[in-house]
Amino acid sequence: MDIIIRKAQPEDAGAIINYMKVIGSETDNLSFGSEGFPISQEEEAGLIHEKNKSPRNALFLATKNERIIGKASIEAFSCRMAHRAEFGISVVKAEWGRGIGRKLLETVIQHAKLHQIEIIELEVRSDNERAIRLYNNFGFVKIGAYPKYFKMNDSSYVDFDLMNLYL
């Protein structure tokens, strides 16, 4: 089965919303749970349309048998911060450890280089060893920590690491 990495289109909005519900139920590494990200299909389609209007921003989907199994986004800043961009990634749990995240990250880095982005920034749970290992393998470095970044349902806090990749 071939994995296809492609840019998201507005017509992917419904599938993306369903994907977000799936990944939200599989991990506590995200800012939302099984309810998914609180956005309508129309709003998601509009966001994708706006993102696609800027060549520097991108939402990439990893699909397998036409089903979304991963996604990665890069959002470039503007003005005096135009050399920087924020990065986010997720993969369905059934595909963890199969190179999907690596393929998505490679795609994002190629995109960043093509569009003169010099620094890719991310935040990751400090205890998410699998993701941190992936980022370190690509040359990301920890530049700091954000204590109490998440507050969980049980009122406990989770710290996050701040990481940058200097291209």
Image (cartoon, rainbow, N blue to C red):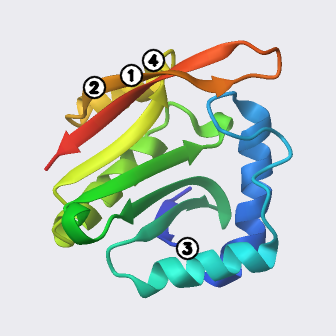
How far apart, in angstroms, are the residues tagged by discs 3 and 2? 29 Å
Q: Quadrant of residue 23?
A: top right
Q: Earlier in the sequence, mark 3 or mark 1?
A: 3
Residue position marked by numbered label 3 in the rendering: 8
Numbered tag placed on residue 129 in the rendering: 4
Return the residue nearer the eye: 24 or 32.
Answer: 32
How far apart, in angstroms, are the residues tagged by discs 4 and 2? 13 Å
- Closer to us: mark 4 or mark 1? 1
- Closer to us: mark 3 or mark 2? 2
In contact (CB < 8 Å): disc 3 and disc 2: no
What's the amino acid at mark 1? Ala
In contact (CB < 8 Å): disc 3 and disc 1: no
How far apart, in angstroms, are the residues tagged by discs 2 and 1? 8 Å
In the picture shown, does residue 102 fall above or below 61? above
Q: Quadrant of residue 164?
A: top left
What's the amino acid at mark 2? Lys
Numbered tag placed on residue 142 in the rendering: 2
